[in-house]
C-alpha cells in the first residue's frame, strides 16, 4: 500500500508539473505577440503622423485660396502649391492603404481579445477616418484648383485681348511698291488670329472651371472672337496673294487680290463690334478687373463649393482627435 500511495503521489506531481509548464508556456508567446503587435502598430502611427501633416497643410491651403484676393499673381502661386500638395496627398493615401495590410497582419497575431476590441480597433478606426479626411481635402483642393485656374485663365485672356487690340492698331497701310508693308500686315493678322483663338479658349476654360455669370458671359461673347480669327485667317491668305504679286511686279494680280479685302475686313469689323456689344461691362471694368458685382458672384460660388467640405473636415477632425486620444492611452 505504501508503494502504491507513493506511486500515486508521484503521478499526481508529474501531472501538476506538466499542467504548470503547459499554461506557463502559453503566456510566453502571447506576451511576445503583443510586443510584436505594438511594433507594427507604431509603424501605422508613424504613417498617421506623416499623413496628418500633409492633410493639415492641404486644408490650410484651401482656406487660403478661399480667402485670397482674386488676382492673377496670387492664384498662379496657389496653383503651384495645389499641384505640389496633390502629389503629396496621393503618396499619403497610398501609405494609408498599405497601413491596412499591416493591421490585417496584426489581426492574425495571438492577442488578447481586449487588445483587438480596444487598442487595435481604435487604430483601425483612425486609419479609416483619415482616408475619409483625405477624400475631403482632395475635394477642397479640387475646388481650389478650379477657382485658381479660372482666375488665371481670365486674367490671361484679358491681357491677351489687350495685346490683340494693340496689334490691330499697328496695321500699316500697304503699297504695291513696298512689299515689306504687306509682309508686316500679314504677320500682324496672323498674330491677331492666334491671339483671338487663345482668348476664346481661355474664356471657355474659365467658365468650365467656375460656372458663374462673369465667366459664362465672357465665354458666350468670345464666340465672336472665333469669327475674328476666321476673318483674320482669310485676310492672311489675301495678303499672301498681295505679297506675291508685289514681289513679282504683278500689278493686275495685286489689284485682283486687293479687291477681295473689303468683304473680309467688313466681317472682321462686324465681329469685333458684336464682341464689344456683348462684353459684360457690368462685370469687368475698363482696366480688365472684376467689378464688385462679379466678385460677389464668385463669393457665392465659393460658399456653395467650399463650406460643406470645410464642415465635413471639421467633423472628421473631431472624430479623429477622439480616436487618437484613445490610441494614446495604449494597451493596458
Image: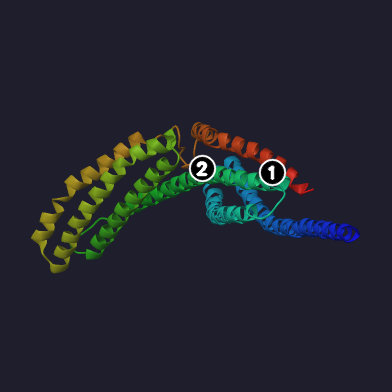
Q: Is mark 1 on a helix, strand or loop?
A: helix
**Considering only vertical position in the picture, is 134 above or below 91?**
above
Mark 1 is surrounded, within 10 Å at the Cα level, by few (under 14), some (14 to 19) or many (20 or more) other residues, namely few
Nearest-to-viewer mark from 2 and 1: 1
Q: How many labels does the image show?
A: 2
* Percent x, y of residue 19: 79, 56
Q: Residue at x 53, y 48 (%)?
A: 75
Mark 2 is surrounded, within 10 Å at the Cα level, by few (under 14), some (14 to 19) or many (20 or more) other residues, namely many
Q: Residue at x 56, y 57 (%)?
A: 91
* Foreground pick, 33 / 119: 33
Indicate the quadrant where residue 308 lies. Answer: top right
* Percent x, y of residue 8: 84, 57
Q: Is mark 2 on a helix, strand or loop?
A: helix
Q: Which of marks 2 and 1 is nearer the N terminus?
A: 1
Name the disc covering residue 143, or none: 2
Quadrant assignment for the N terminus? bottom right
* Percent x, y of residue 61: 60, 47
Residue where numbered disc 1 is placed: 117
Is residue 215 at least partly visible in the picture? yes
Q: Which residue is drawn at 32% across and 39% down?
A: 275
Q: Are dots 2 and 1 in contact, CB under 8 Å?
A: no
* Foreground pick, 43 / 288: 43
**Considering only vertical position in the picture, is 179 above or below 328?**
below
Question: Left or right: 195 with respect to 240?
Answer: right
Amino acid at each position: 500500500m505504501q508503494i502504491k500511495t507513493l506511486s500515486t503521489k508521484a503521478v499526481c506531481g508529474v501531472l501538476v508539473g506538466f499542467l504548470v509548464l503547459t499554461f506557463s508556456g502559453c503566456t510566453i508567446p502571447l506576451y511576445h505577440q503583443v510586443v510584436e503587435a505594438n511594433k507594427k502598430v507604431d509603424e501605422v502611427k508613424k504613417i498617421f503622423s506623416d499623413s496628418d501633416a500633409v492633410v493639415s497643410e492641404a486644408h490650410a491651403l484651401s482656406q487660403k485660396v478661399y480667402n485670397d484676393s482674386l488676382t492673377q499673381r496670387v492664384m498662379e502661386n496657389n496653383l503651384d502649391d495645389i499641384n505640389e500638395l496633390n502629389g503629396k496627398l496621393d503618396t499619403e493615401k497610398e501609405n494609408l492603404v498599405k497601413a491596412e495590410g499591416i493591421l490585417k497582419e496584426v489581426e492574425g497575431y495571438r492577442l488578447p481579445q481586449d487588445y483587438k476590441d480596444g487598442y487595435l480597433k481604435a487604430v483601425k478606426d483612425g486609419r479609416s477616418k483619415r482616408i475619409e479626411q483625405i477624400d475631403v481635402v482632395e475635394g477642397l483642393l479640387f475646388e481650389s484648383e478650379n477657382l485658381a485656374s479660372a482666375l488665371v485663365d481670365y486674367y490671361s485672356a484679358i491681357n491677351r485681348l489687350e495685346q490683340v487690340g494693340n496689334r490691330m492698331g499697328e496695321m500699316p497701310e500697304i503699297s504695291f511698291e513696298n512689299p515689306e508693308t504687306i509682309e508686316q500686315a500679314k504677320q500682324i493678322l496672323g498674330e491677331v488670329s492666334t491671339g483671338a483663338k487663345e482668348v476664346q479658349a481661355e474664356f471657355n476654360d474659365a467658365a468650365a472651371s467656375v460656372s458663374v455669370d462673369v465667366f459664362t458671359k465672357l465665354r458666350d461673347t468670345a464666340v465672336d472672337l472665333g469669327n475674328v480669327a476666321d476673318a483674320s485667317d482669310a485676310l492672311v491668305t489675301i495678303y499672301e496673294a498681295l505679297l506675291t504679286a508685289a514681289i513679282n511686279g504683278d500689278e493686275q494680280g495685286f489689284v485682283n487680290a486687293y479687291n477681295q479685302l473689303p468683304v473680309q475686313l467688313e466681317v472682321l469689323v462686324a465681329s469685333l463690334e458684336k464682341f464689344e456689344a456683348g462684353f459684360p461691362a457690368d462685370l469687368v471694368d475698363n482696366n480688365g478687373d472684376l467689378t464688385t458685382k462679379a466678385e460677389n458672384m464668385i463669393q457665392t460660388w465659393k460658399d456653395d463649393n467650399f463650406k460643406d467640405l470645410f464642415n465635413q473636415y471639421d467633423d472628421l477632425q473631431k472624430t479623429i482627435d477622439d480616436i487618437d486620444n484613445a490610441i494614446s492611452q495604449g494597451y493596458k
